[in-house]
């Protein structure tokens, strides 16, 4: 079935059928920014995503930690682009890409394209240990965040019902593998939840006794940041009660814990924030790829040999001035906006200028009043860092309503130490 | 394993072990009100629920309709009773009750009780057609609400991707079976979503063309209310574009629609708001039960022959002045508070006075500015009814924060016609 000729668009899509068809795969930062930057281009745009919503990924960990509800940090893609007359959104799962016939297969149909933007991002990598995935879930999507929330909250509930003190301690032990920004944020917020939010509400279990281990194979937390900020972040984490293990590679994960060489931590809840692998759709493009599966792109972000295909965001492998462009939200947004410009140039018969990544710095929150910020050499931390983090995140949240709702939820949590979204959906996992 | 002797309570539970043990099953209105009314009683209370949260059921349909997010209308049970020193909350699923040995079995353990309050409520009844359950989900729990939200939102998404106009129309047709308050509220809010919230966001599907059928076997909508209000409600529903079928009993439900005798409605989404059956745990109490499985109780709400067991809320079968006490939130709260008082009397060696149900009236919302209200003879409707409905619901919502959050979400939705929680979690159901 060929969809792109059959559909009868109504209303503002009239007269679009003769325009070049741009198909954009993925509604994350890259794909969404590309879509929006094509608003006034003489093309018609089909944005395809398996979810119906864009997620503000930098705050996913707050959904996992029950501080925010899912809808606080997500908005329906079709709502975001509702005023963009040349764009349509399809909620379908992409199963294949054929650059030879210029078509994309989904679970529902085949879609022909004139231009393709692949922005399907990344997923978790377990370094060949796929069995670990079920035991140590990662945090990339809204589904992941809700699953992790359920595990964390259920662990405290299980501890409360467990008469055996040794097993109760297992339920109150949490291991987070990987001390990048996500792992650190999860560890910090989990420590705050255990030591401040929950203690008064339990009678048998003592959330205050919960142990939170952050395990990092590398030599320091936040390896991508300057050493000074790593040291500050580690000290702050330790002051929150997080046990930081650096230089310890995880060698096994099973139902009751984690092994690092000779060492073993007995824990019922293990979360994965260590490895990243490119979306498997990258393999279908046929080009060169790095070890994590990222697709090598030309300086204009096109697939070598296919000027009509652009690869952006976490899926793209691009080096600039001897440095890899990092898999971060600002890079994805810049690539999305650039790909849209380059595409307009191509449609107009011109050759696009090459992409230049502009480093906007990086930041990571540690706790409710502490963050580390690195703005191209200008580094700061503590409460000032946290205020900067707060303003930056609220500013970049999509949608006016969400910003206010999130501010309200944060203000409330900040004043009361409460978490607004401590709802376990889907029942409690069994003890064994 | 006997839990009630093994657990070592800490902090404020010290010294509670010698008190009579009251086990309360179910954290809905009945069980929660009973728990809170025992705050100063010389007993220790264990509240058991398979969920970790209390749900404000009268607003569940707004979660199903994506107007509110789950956490807006739910709060963790242990948070609600955190200051009640004699109460503890266990998140476990109850699998059996043995009134002879005075014990309750859960998936995790056996709990002994001195007094038992059974408040496990009701579930959906498909009148012997259990196969309909998968095709036409009902709305009782948070899980139900999120599943229905996913179905409704996914139907519009599927319509947008469907090139065949006839099949697209099937995706845009919704059938709600049962025109009690829940069915009517679902139909009204679904009509508003289709005709006001969504139209500008779709390019192929026309949400404005969506058809919403409300099918009722009885002779009128809102059968429990005065005829005048039924007529007003039906007219209002029809003005919203809902097609109301009264006197039509559903005879079959399959993957593509609903049959009512000779008539058939082709629809991809069918929701069930028709039958109610008592919680199956009622059968384990050994007493007399009515056709829906409700347990006959003595005038003091105890199980005949077992003065230490109380049955309250939707599970109780009680007639008063020739009228059945209805399965509604106010009745459950009154029964919960009464059971706590009666229990204190029993503990003190006195005989409790009998329960008297006080009819507080009933109300049902139809749309964003219309509701019907029946306050024991004083009836009103329209905008005044809706304002009353709004104030009553905000007033009764548990938790200060939730009230403000819900007010904010409602105000925003009211002004913008937007829905804040249009997030599909868990992927799109397949077409067939």
Image (tube, coloured by chain):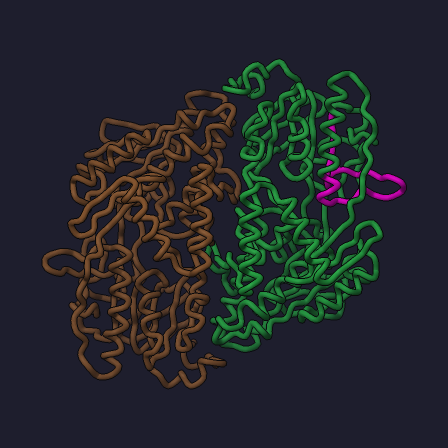
Chain colours: A green, B brown
Residue depicted at 47% across the width and 71% down the height: A161
Residue A178 seen in the current view: no
Residue A157 versus residue B209 in the image, above or below: below
Residue A317: say if magenta: yes
Residue B382 at x, y percent in the picture: 27, 39
Residue depicted at 42% across the width and 61% down the height: B399
Residue B358 seen in the current view: yes
Classify residue A423 as left or right of residue A403.
Answer: left
B141, B72: nearer the viewer: B72
Image quarter where the N terminus of chain A lies is top right
Classify residue B351 as left or right of residue A151.
Answer: left
Residue depicted at 60% across the width and 31% down the height: A48
A135, B144: nearer the viewer: B144
Residue depicted at 42% across the width and 54% down the height: B73
A326, A408: nearer the viewer: A408
Q: Which residues are magenta?
A: A309-332
Residue A90 at x, y percent in the picture: 56, 30
A117, A395: nearer the viewer: A395
The answer to which image quadrant residue A67 occupies is bottom right
Residue B410 at x, y percent in the picture: 43, 45
């Amino acid at each position: 079935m060929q969809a792109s000729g059959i559909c009868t668009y109504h209303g503002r899509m009239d007269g679009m059928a003769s325009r070049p068809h741009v198909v954009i795969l993925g509604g994350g930062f890259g794909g969404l920014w590309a879509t929006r930057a094509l608003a006034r281009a003489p093309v018609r745009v089909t944005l395809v995503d398996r979810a119906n919503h864009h997620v503000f990924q930098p705050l996913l960990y707050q959904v996992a930690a029950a501080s925010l509800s899912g809808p606080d940090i997500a908005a329906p893609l079709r709502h975001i682009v509702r005023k963009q007359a040349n764009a349509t959104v399809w909620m379908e799962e992409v199963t294949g890409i054929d650059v030879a016939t210029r078509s994309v297969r989904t679970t529902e149909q085949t879609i022909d394209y004139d231009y393709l933007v692949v922005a399907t991002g990344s997923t978790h990598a377990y370094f060949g240990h796929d069995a670990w995935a079920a035991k140590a879930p990662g945090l990339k999507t809204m589904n992941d965040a809700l699953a992790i929330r359920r595990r964390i909250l259920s662990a405290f509930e299980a501890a409360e019902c467990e008469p055996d003190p040794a097993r109760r301690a297992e339920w109150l032990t949490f291991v987070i593998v990987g001390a990048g920004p996500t792992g650190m944020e999860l560890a910090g917020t989990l420590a705050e939840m255990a030591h401040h939010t929950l203690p008064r509400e339990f009678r048998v279990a003592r959330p205050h006794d919960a142990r939170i281990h952050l395990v990092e194979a590398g030599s320091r937390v936040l390896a991508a940041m300057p050493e000074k900020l790593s040291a500050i972040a580690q000290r702050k984490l330790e002051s929150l009660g997080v046990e930081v293990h650096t230089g310890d590679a995880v060698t096994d994960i099973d139902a009751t814990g984690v092994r690092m060489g000779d060492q073993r931590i007995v824990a019922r809840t293990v979360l994965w924030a260590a490895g990243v692998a490119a979306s498997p759709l990258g393999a279908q493009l046929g080009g060169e790829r790095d070890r994590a599966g990222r697709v090598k792109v030309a300086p204009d972000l096109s697939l070598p040999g296919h000027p009509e295909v652009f690869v952006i965001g976490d899926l793209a492998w691009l080096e600039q001035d001897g440095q890899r462009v990092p898999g971060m939200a600002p890079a994805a947004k810049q690539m999305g906006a650039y790909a849209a410009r380059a595409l307009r140039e191509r449609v107009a018969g011109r050759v696009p200028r090459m992409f230049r990544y502009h480093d906007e710095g990086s930041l990571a929150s540690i706790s409710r009043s502490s963050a580390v910020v690195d703005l191209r050499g200008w580094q700061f931390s503590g409460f000032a860092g946290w205020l900067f983090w707060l303003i930056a995140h609220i500013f970049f949240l999509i949608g006016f309503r969400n910003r206010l709702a999130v501010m309200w939820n944060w203000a409330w949590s900040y004043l009361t130490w409460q978490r607004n979204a401590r709802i376990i959906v889907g029942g409690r996992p069994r003890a064994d």
